[in-house]
Amino acid sequence: MLHDSNWTSRLPFDITLANFRPDSRLAEIVKRYIWLLFSKFIRVLQSFTDHRF
């Protein structure tokens, strides 16, 4: 139900990394580049408009 009811929402749900314990080098890479990696995806979500049937 969560997936179906949030499929067309502008803010469907938060994504959280839980119990994520990488080594220190990988953790620094993730912290540094997380917004760069997801910035295009976030722009697509922000520009989403409902389809009028």
Image (tube, rainbow, N blue to C red):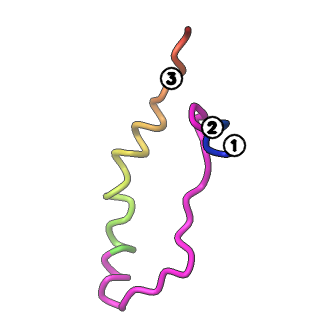
Identified by mark 3, the residue type is Thr
Q: Residues in magenta?
A: 7-29
What secondary structure is marked by label 2? helix
Q: Residue at x 34, y 45 (%)?
A: 40
Say the numbered circle drawn on residue 1.
1
Pointers 1 and 2 in contact (CB under 8 A)? yes
What secondary structure is marked by label 3? loop
Q: Which quadrant holds the C terminus?
A: top right
Q: Specify which label sits upstream in the sequence, 1 or 3.
A: 1
Q: Main secondary structure of the magenta part?
A: loop
Query: What residue does disc 2 label?
Result: 4
Magenta stretch encompasses residue 21: yes
Of the two numbered discs 3 and 2 in the rendering, the one whose residue sits closer to the viewer: 2
Query: What residue does disc 3 label?
Result: 49
Q: CA distance from mark 3 to mark 2?
A: 17 Å
Identified by mark 1, the residue type is Met
